[in-house]
């Protein structure tokens, strides 16, 4: 039976991707603020 829940591995990749994007955004914002 197919589960409607997303694959945990895929979900983990999504979370990691979002965290990396947010971290990059914050770093860019800090650099912009400093300069």
Image (cartoon, rainbow, N blue to C red):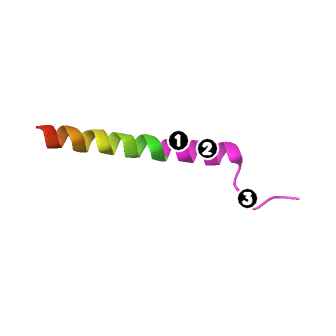
Q: Earlier in the sequence, mark 2 or mark 3?
A: 3
Residue 12 among those drawn in magenta: yes
Residue 11 among those drawn in magenta: yes
- Residue at image mark 3: 5
Question: Residue sitting at 58 percent across and 42 percent down?
Answer: 13
Q: What's the magenta region?
A: 1-17
The numbered mark at residue 24 is none
* Distance from the alpha carbon under mark 2 to that under mark 3: 13 Å
- Residue at image mark 1: 16
Marks 1 and 2 close (CB-CB < 8 Å): yes
> Could you say whether the residue bearing mark 2 is in a helix, strand or loop?
helix
Coordinates of residue 9 in the picture (x, y in percent): 67, 42
Of the pair 35 and 9, the residue shown nearer to us: 35
Question: Residue sitting at 61 percent across and 44 percent down?
Answer: 12
Coordinates of residue 31 in the picture (x, y in percent): 20, 37
Total labels drawn: 3
């Amino acid at each position: 039976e197919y589960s409607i829940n997303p694959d945990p591995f895929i979900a983990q990749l999504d979370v990691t991707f979002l965290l990396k994007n947010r971290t990059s955004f914050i770093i860019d914002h800090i650099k912009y603020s400093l300069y």
